[in-house]
C-alpha cells in the first residue's frame, strides 16, 4: 500500500524530543524525507537522526535557533541544498516560562514570545519562496488550547499561541491561491517530558477537565499532523484543530 507522504520532504522545528520527535518519526514511517531542527546537536538529535535514517528515508538534524531570523534563513538555505525542496513545514519549537502576571519579568515575556511566535514567522518566511515556486505546500503550526481559551499563570505562553492562530489564518488567505495550505493544531494536556515534571496535584486538576479522562500522547498529535501534511486534507486550510480529548469544545 502506498505511503501517505511518499516523495515529500518535511521540515520540523524543535524535533529532538517530545511532540516534535513523534512527528518526525510518523512522517518518516509514512515515507517522507525529514529535515529537523533543535537548539543544539546533542545526543537526542543524533539518536533521532539515526532512527529516521534506519526507516529508509533521507534524514538530517540541524542545530538552529528558530527565534533568530538570519540563522533560520541560513538553515533553510542549507536544507534546500541538502533535500532539494520542502513540501511540509511543521512549526513545533516552543518553550514555557510560566508565572502570574504580577511576578512575570519582561525577560520571561520577551523570551516566550520570541521563541514561540517569532520562530513561526521566521521559518514560514524562509520556506515561502520555495513553496511558491512549486505551487504546493502544507504549513502546520503547533498552537495550544491555552492559545484558544487562556490559562492563569501562562499569559505569555497563551499570547504566543494565540498569535500563532492569527498568523495561521492570515497565511492561509495569503498563500491559498498558490495551493499552499496553512493550519494550526491546538494540543491539550499531552504527556511529555515537560508535563511529567508537573506535580501530581496539577496533573489531577488537568484530568478533571478532560472528558476522555486521560492525557493525550505525542502520537495523538503526530497523527493529526500526518493528516494535515498529506493530501487527505487537500481542501483543509486556515483551520485550528484541537487535540484535547474534548477539554476545549
Image: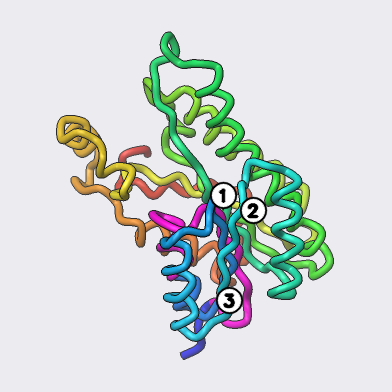
Identify the residue position indicated by label 1 in the image. 141
Q: Upstream in the sequence, badge 1 or badge 2?
A: 1
Asked which quadrant contains residue 116, the reply is top right
Q: Nearer the viewer, residue 72 or 132?
A: 72
Q: Upstream in the sequence, badge 3 or badge 1?
A: 3
Asked which quadrant contains residue 13, the reply is bottom right
Measure the C-alpha gap from mark 1 to mark 2: 8 Å
Task: Give the numbered dot on residue 58.
Answer: none
SS under mark 1 = strand
Identify the residue position indicated by label 2 in the image. 182
Give percent across and percent down for residue 131. 76, 63
Q: Residue at point 39% right, 20% down?
A: 99
Indicate yes or no whether the magenta region holds residue 63.
no
Q: Residue at point 25% right, 44% down?
A: 196
Give the quadrant of the C terminus: top left
Q: Nearer the viewer, residue 240 or 134?
A: 134
Q: Which residues are magenta?
A: 5-25
Give neighbour class at mark 3: few <14, some 14-19, many 20+ (Cα, 10 Å): many
In this rendering, the count of numbered labels is: 3
Q: Is residue 152 left or right of residue 143?
A: left
Indicate yes or no whether the magenta region holds residue 24.
yes
- Is 164 located above or below residue 150 in the figure? below
Q: Residue at point 72% right, 71% down?
A: 85
Give percent across and percent down for residue 158. 48, 29
- Is 14 located above or below residue 204 in the figure? below
Measure the C-alpha gap from mark 3 to mark 1: 19 Å
Q: In the displayed image of the protein, which residue is found farthest to the top?
A: 102
Q: Are marks 1 and 2 in contact (CB under 8 Å)?
A: yes
Identify the residue position indicated by label 3 in the image. 33
Q: Are marks 3 and 2 in contact (CB under 8 Å)?
A: no
Give percent across and percent down for residue 20. 46, 57
Q: Nearer the viewer, residue 198 or 129?
A: 198
Amino acid at each position: 500500500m502506498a505511503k501517505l507522504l511518499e516523495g515529500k520532504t518535511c521540515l520540523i522545528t524543535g524535533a529532538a524530543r517530545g511532540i516534535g520527535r513523534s512527528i518526525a518519526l510518523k512522517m518518516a514511517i509514512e515515507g517522507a524525507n525529514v529535515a529537523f531542527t533543535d537548539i543544539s546537536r546533542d545526543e537526542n538529535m543524533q539518536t533521532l537522526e539515526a532512527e529516521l535514517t534506519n526507516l529508509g528515508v533521507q534524514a538530517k538534524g540541524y542545530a538552529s535557533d528558530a527565534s533568530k531570523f538570519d540563522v533560520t534563513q541560513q538553515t533553510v538555505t542549507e536544507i534546500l541544498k541538502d533535500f532539494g525542496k520542502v513540501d511540509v513545514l511543521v512549526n513545533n519549537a516552543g518553550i514555557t516560562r510560566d508565572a502570574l502576571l504580577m511576578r512575570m519579568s519582561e525577560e520571561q515575556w520577551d523570551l516566550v514570545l520570541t521563541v514561540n511566535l517569532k520562530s513561526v514567522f521566521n521559518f514560514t518566511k524562509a520556506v515561502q519562496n520555495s513553496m511558491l515556486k512549486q505551487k504546493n505546500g502544507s504549513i502546520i503550526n503547533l498552537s495550544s488550547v491555552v492559545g484558544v481559551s487562556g490559562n492563569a499563570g501562562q499569559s505569555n505562553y497563551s499570547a504566543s499561541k494565540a498569535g500563532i492562530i492569527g498568523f495561521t489564518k492570515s497565511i492561509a488567505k495569503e498563500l491559498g491561491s498558490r495551493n499552499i495550505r496553512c493550519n494550526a493544531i491546538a494540543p491539550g494536556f499531552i504527556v511529555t517530558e515537560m508535563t511529567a515534571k508537573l506535580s501530581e496535584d496539577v496533573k489531577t486538576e488537568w484530568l478533571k477537565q478532560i472528558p476522555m479522562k486521560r492525557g493525550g500522547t505525542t502520537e495523538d498529535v503526530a497523527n493529526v499532523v500526518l493528516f494535515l501534511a498529506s493530501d487527505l486534507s487537500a481542501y483543509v486550510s486556515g483551520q485550528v484543530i484541537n487535540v484535547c480529548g474534548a477539554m476545549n469544545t
